[in-house]
Image (cartoon, helix red, strand yellow):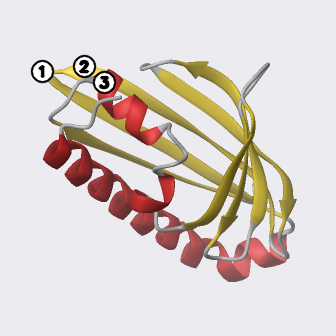
Amino acid sequence: MRTITVKNAIHIKSTKENVWNFTQNFDNRKTWDKSILECQVLQKKPFKLIWIKTIGGIKAKLKYKICDKANKTTLKLIDVKSFIIKSGGGSWKYETENNQTKWTQVNSLVFKNRFWFLVLGSILRKKLEVNTKKSMKIAKTIIEKNNYDI
């Protein structure tokens, strides 16, 4: 396979509804996810479709497959504009645990070919892992500090 996948979980002292509302509101996204340079909601129904531009120069659309409010999302990276990345996807879960929210992310990238995977796979996997953890920590800090609620 030419796929890299990272998984990370973090506990946030807030309800899963608050964590969902903050992390799924794309007006907030650039404040906590530093890998996103630009984003725009293209449509909300029948499925959520978001255009993004990342620090790596990737432009793509996030097409939500599951959007179960305050519980789970799954999405696919489509219409990808990149020299090395073909597609990707992710799944985020929000679970109540000990009066906190356990927020889990699983994120994947699929390389266009074996060459790019062999040359950059381990580097980009590490970068994706670091960026995922860092972004989740920033979101946690903002949510807990502001007791974010919509």
Outermost residue to the bottom: 119
- Pointer 2 local density, CA inside 10 Å: few below 14, some 14–19, many at least 20: some
Report the mark closest to the observer, 3 or 2: 3
Outermost residue to the front: 150
- Residue depicted at 14% across the width and 35% down the height: 13
Report the front residue among 67 and 121.
67
Residue contact between numbered discs 2 and 1, judged by CB atoms under 8 Å:
yes
Give the Cα distance between marks 2 and 1.
6 Å
Q: Counting residues from the N terminus, which is met first, the one under dot 3 or under dot 2?
A: 3
Tell me which amino acid carries mark 1. Asn
Q: Is residue 74 left or right of residue 104?
A: right
- Pointer 3 local density, CA inside 10 Å: few below 14, some 14–19, many at least 20: many
Up the image or down, 69 lies above or below 85; here it is: above
Residue 1's x, y, as percent?
A: 75, 54
Label count reads 3
Q: Is residue 116 left or right of residue 71?
A: right
**Residue 16 — which label?**
3
- Residue depicted at 27% across the width and 31% down the height: 102
Give the Cα distance between marks 3 and 2.
6 Å
Report the front residue among 70 and 146.
146
Residue 141's x, y, as percent?
A: 21, 53
The residue carrying mark 2 is 96
The residue carrying mark 1 is 99
- Residue depicted at 29% across the width and 30% down the height: 149
